[in-house]
Image: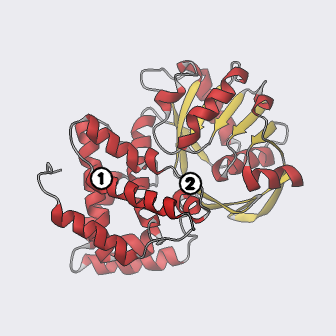
Amino acid sequence: MKVTVLGAGAIGSMFGGLIKHHAAEIDVLLIGRGDHGRAIHDSGEVVLEGPWPARRVAIRCTEDVAQLAGSDVVLLTVKSQATEAAIRAAAPYLGQAALVSIQNGINGPKLLEFVAADRLVLGMTATNMAILKPGNVSLQLDGATLLGTPPGQQAGASLDQAVTVLRKSGLQVRAHSNIVGAQYNKLAINALGYASCLSASRFILEAVLHPPWRRALAVPLLDECAAVFQAAGVSLEKAPGAPGLHSFRRLLKWLERPLVGPLLDRFGRRVLARRKPIVFSLYQDLLRSKPTEIDSINGEIVRMARQQGRDAPYNALVVDLVHQLQQRGDGTFFSREFVIEQFSSLAANKSGQPAV
């Protein structure tokens, strides 16, 4: 069996490397560019870190998309903004391979322009992975990866094959009947997480558990996401053990309670202090002055709102501020106080929005 990872960044390298580690008989090929891809190609191995001793996994890596020809499964893990270019380049070589998309954003409609519905598998992962340095990837947070079919498509051989292959990674992988709902749930959580990247703040410890940030950003952002999804008729699902949009909104309300809030705050800080921090791809991209997914995450929510004849000003402000950081292009970030001030000013000027 041949498995190719198209877009071998943090997620793709980790899945591909773990599959090769646990199932050496599978021919695993990574297709990746940049310093990370070159490091794997030159060394002939990828280094995987996690709740295990560091693993050095011998694996092939190339920039040549044509080498995915003959694959049984192609794992698509490129950034959302690169989806169309990647699938357009890969399409002539896919043959009858199952294409498994594990990406941020909502990319199914675009992929269906190039791949038959019965060969497309959509995914969502609650794991968090980061490139520590070129050729070295870390599992920052374990979690479930859900796979499912496009809307209206019955589960079949491609989904079964995808689940079987990805389970060889040793990570939690399962089929799900509402994969698009799970993708939208993650879209909202990422939209909030990306807001924390504006000031390079740790998502929970320095953002959500910081009352001024929570009140100015977290609450209105998630309320806005919920309103947009409800108006669009989206039925949300969450991955087992991962936060859901509605449960996260309830948590924010509990944190504001006089007695319970401080207890939750102290407990959360003690637990999270012992864990690796969540590293969002947006933070890494801004730090390295690379293109970002912001238009496919917060920008997707803005587009959804406009399709309904409404606005999503809080998500739009995140997009605008990220674009400002990109234009600076120096790997620097705003102060947390500046970000809070920007969102507080928006709230003060905002009027006429429908209630959630």
| Residue that extends furthest to the left in the rendered view of this protein | 352
Name the kind of residue labelled 1 in the image: His
Q: Is residue 111 visible?
A: yes
In the displayed structure, 143 sits above or below 210; it is: above
Q: Is residue 238 visible?
A: no
Q: Mark 2 or mark 1: which comes first in sequence?
A: 2
**Label for residue 246?**
1
Residue at 46% x, 51% y: name it: 294
Residue behind mark 2:
127
How are the residues colored? secondary structure
- Where disc 1 sits, the SS reads helix
In the displayed structure, 77 sits above or below 110; it is: below
Name the kind of residue labelled 2 in the image: Thr
In the displayed structure, 66 sits above or below 301; it is: above
Residue at 21% x, 74% y: name it: 257
Residue at 61% x, 28% y: name it: 160
64 on left or right of 337: right
